[in-house]
């Protein structure tokens, strides 16, 4: 069961990473449109249902325009998915340097075809996806230090964006899942480790396990 939860968490992080990285592909939209989700009133389930409905009602042209307005724009989009901006008000600041330092300790580096700085929300989700199979304290340290400090500001900005339509559902899912993770990591995970180590080696079930 624990391995299933780890796999599920890793998959959700990758879905969020893909949604923030670029306009959703037709394959991702098809996957979201076919999700089988149990009906209950939890924040996660409601968010999944809204995202599924948004995917069913979407079209590629509108998604392309929406993503352009939200994340690219002319000079800057309505939403800024970088930790430095949300924590300091400027890009390429100390939070980015801190993330790069910790990624170096983890033995992780940006792929050559990726242009965005490492404090992009998508990049951080990808790192967390990798870490879901690693030590619990390591996950807690990275999440609390590099994501938990600013994701509410990001989801608020996205939910209030003028051109947000499909991404309103993305904002809701992001907020619900990250809040669940934050609760999960609020406990003091017991371990002998005191710093990041160098070598990194169904939705309902996950949420219920944290409840």
Image (tube, helix red, strand yellow):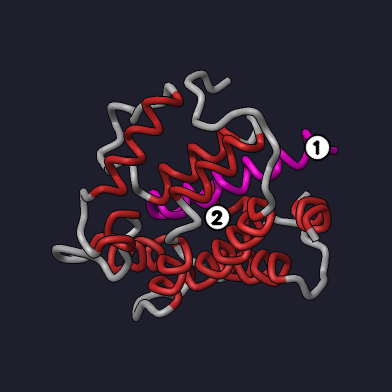
In the image: residue 177, left or right of residue 162: right
| Residue that appears at 31% across and 48% down | 95
Residue 69 point in image, percent of width and height:
28, 68
Magenta region, mostly helix, strand or loop?
A: helix
Q: Residues within 10 Å of mark 2 (few under 14, many from 20)?
A: many
Could you say where residue 34 lies in the image, as x and y percent from the top left? 69, 56
Q: Give the answer, above or below, for where 21 lies relative to 37.
A: above
Q: Which residues are magenta?
A: 1-27
View extreme (right): residue: 1
Image quarter of the C terminus: bottom right
Mark 1 Cα shell of 10 Å, populated few (<14), some (14-19), many (≥20)? few
As measured in the structure, the alpha-carbon distance from the residue carrying label 1 to the one carrying label 2 is: 28 Å
In the picture, residue 169 is in which quadrant?
bottom right
Q: What count of labels does the image hold? A: 2
In the image, taking residue 67 as reference, residue 145 lies left or right, namely: right
Query: In the rendered image, which residue does mark 2 sit on?
Result: 29
- Residue at disc 2, secondary structure: helix
Measured as percent of width and height from the top left, residue 10 is found at 62, 40
| Residue 132 located within the stretch drawn in magenta | no
- Residue receiving disc 1: 2
For image coordinates 27% across by 40% down, the residue present is 97
| Residue at the outermost left position | 75
Image coords of residue 127 (percent x, y): 49, 37
Residue 1, by quadrant, is top right
């Amino acid at each position: 069961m624990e391995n299933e939860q780890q796999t599920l968490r890793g998959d959700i992080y990758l879905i969020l990473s893909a949604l923030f990285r670029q306009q959703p592909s037709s394959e991702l939209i098809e996957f979201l449109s076919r999700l089988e989700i149990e009906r209950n009133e939890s924040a996660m389930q409601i968010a999944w249902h809204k995202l599924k409905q948004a995917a069913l009602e979407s079209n590629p042209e509108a998604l392309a325009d929406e993503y352009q307005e939200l994340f690219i724009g002319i000079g800057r989009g309505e939403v800024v998915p970088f930790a430095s901006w949300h924590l300091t008000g400027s890009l390429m600041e100390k939070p980015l340097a801190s993330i790069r330092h910790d990624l170096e300790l983890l033995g992780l580096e940006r792929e050559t075809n990726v242009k965005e700085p490492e404090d992009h929300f998508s990049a951080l989700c990808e790192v967390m996806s990798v870490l879901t199979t690693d030590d619990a304290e390591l996950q807690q340290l990275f999440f609390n230090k590099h994501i938990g400090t600013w994701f509410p500001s990001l989801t608020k900005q996205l939910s209030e964006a003028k051109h947000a339509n499909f991404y309103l559902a993305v904002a809701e899912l992001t907020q619900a899942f990250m809040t669940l993770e934050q609760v999960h990591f609020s406990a003091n995970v017991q371990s002998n480790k005191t710093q990041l180590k160098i070598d990194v080696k169904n939705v309902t079930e996950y949420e219920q396990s944290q409840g």
